[in-house]
Amino acid sequence: QVQLVESGGGLVQAGGSLRLSCATSGIIFGMNRMGWYRQAPGKQRELVADISSVGRINYIDSVKGRFTISRDNTKSTVYLQMNSLKPEDTAVYYCNRVISNLPWGQGTQVTVSS
């Protein structure tokens, strides 16, 4: 059974840091491009960062230089290190396979106060 379990969110002040983790099961993790998505209240879900099976990485412009995506294929886990957080980063964060999304997990709430 496919499972995506996100963790690591929380409430931080602007300028703070958080590290998100996403543990996966039920997929051949090492063969998949994985991504972190976020959905802010009243907005569509957007892909924030993704990492291919061989480590090629993409970020949206608004997080470049602040967020770092990484993966550990031995643990079937993808991470998102978020530094210099801004109030506009407030959202529920999800991980998923980028091509052909899997059933979504519950996400993890990130709230950045000003």
Image: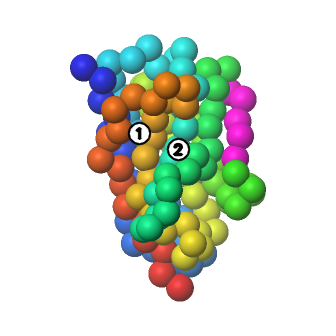
With 52 as the anchor, is 74 left or right in this view?
Answer: left
Residue type indicated by callout 1: Cys
Residue 60 shows up from this direction: yes
Pick the front one: 71 or 26: 26
With 15 as the anchor, is 107 left or right in this view?
Answer: left
In the rendered image, which quarter contains the N terminus? top left
Residue mark closest to the camera, 1 vs 2: 2
Q: Quadrant of residue 92?
A: bottom left
- Classed neighbour count for the residue bearing mark 2: other residues with Cα under 10 Å, few (<14), some (14–19), many (≥20): many
Residue type indicated by callout 2: Trp
The residue that label 1 is drawn on is 22
- Classed neighbour count for the residue bearing mark 1: other residues with Cα under 10 Å, few (<14), some (14–19), many (≥20): many
Provide residue 70's location: percent of width, then percent of height. 59, 37
Residue at x 67% of width, y 20% of height: 54
CA separation in Å, label 1 and label 2: 9 Å
Chain part drawn in magenta: 55-59
**Residue 44 to residue 59: above or below:** below
The residue that label 2 is drawn on is 36
Residue at x 44% of width, y 14% of height: 28
Q: Secondary structure at mark 2?
A: strand
Tags 1 and 2 touching, CB below 8 Å: yes
With 44 as the anchor, is 104 left or right in this view?
Answer: left
**Residue 76 to residue 107: above or below:** above
With 91 as the anchor, is 49 left or right in this view?
Answer: right
Residue at x 48% of width, y 74% of height: 112
**Residue 31 to residue 14: above or below:** above
State which tag comes first along the sequence, 1 or 2.
1
Q: Main secondary structure of the magenta part?
A: strand
Residue at x 30% of width, y 29% of height: 3
